[in-house]
Amino acid sequence: MNDITNEKWYALFVATGEEDKVKERIYYRIKDELRAVVPKRNIRERKEGKWADNIRIIFPGYVLLNGQINSNNYSLIRDIPGVINLLKDSNGPQEIREHEIELISRLTYNNEIIGRSNIYVQGGQIIVIDGPLLGLEGYIQTIDKRKGRVKVLLNLMGEPRTVELSVEMVQTA
């Protein structure tokens, strides 16, 4: 997702659990006119005493679209199974603000999946050593050291959303 184009970004509201299927259907029907993105996160989860890395969608129920939406591709999108609606305002399709998409793009640097960051806490201050959260310490709300997660405040369509991301706690000497 790191290749932000000059095209506009939009949010498509879809049935939860259908995000990847809708993305594939958009690609099949519209191919070169619109790019569909489903931002995800790699998160460690413990089940039955064992840790495993799982891929989870950051914004369940949304597919992000990059490109120009015209009446032709809008009607193609609207007819895709799983699509509920394109988010709109009084002027038509509502654009995602540039700073919101830049942050999401920065977190998902090489692909659609946000990886793990290495962090430590020194004197009550969070310091990110490397990973997608590098330089974004101000977005971190809380740390759960036991689970290896942080809660990060992201905005989508002007609404604040708290998202859990995986971190590796590093010991300092």
Image (tube, rainbow, N blue to C red):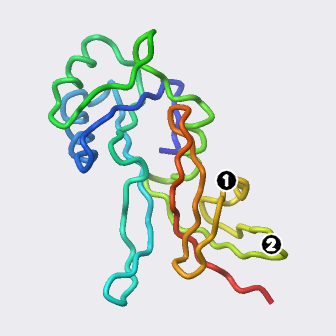
| Structural crowding at the residue carrying mark 2, measured as other residues with C-alpha within 10 Å and reported as few (<14), some (14–19) or many (≥20) | few
In front here: 73 or 94?
Answer: 94
Residue at the spot 51% in from the left edge and 38% down from the top edge: 156
x, y percent for residue 51: 40, 84
User: Which residue bears the numbered disc 1?
Assistant: 139
As drawn, the label of residue 86 is none
User: Which residue bears the numbered disc 2?
Assistant: 124
Residue at the spot 40% in from the left edge and 12% down from the top edge: 92
| Structural crowding at the residue carrying mark 1, measured as other residues with C-alpha within 10 Å and reported as few (<14), some (14–19) or many (≥20) | some
Quarter-of-image position of residue 80: top left
Amino acid type at image mark 1: Tyr
x, y percent for residue 58: 43, 52
Left or right relative to 143: residue 62: left
In front here: 79 or 131?
Answer: 79
Amino acid type at image mark 2: Gly
Furthest residue in direction right, as rendered: 123
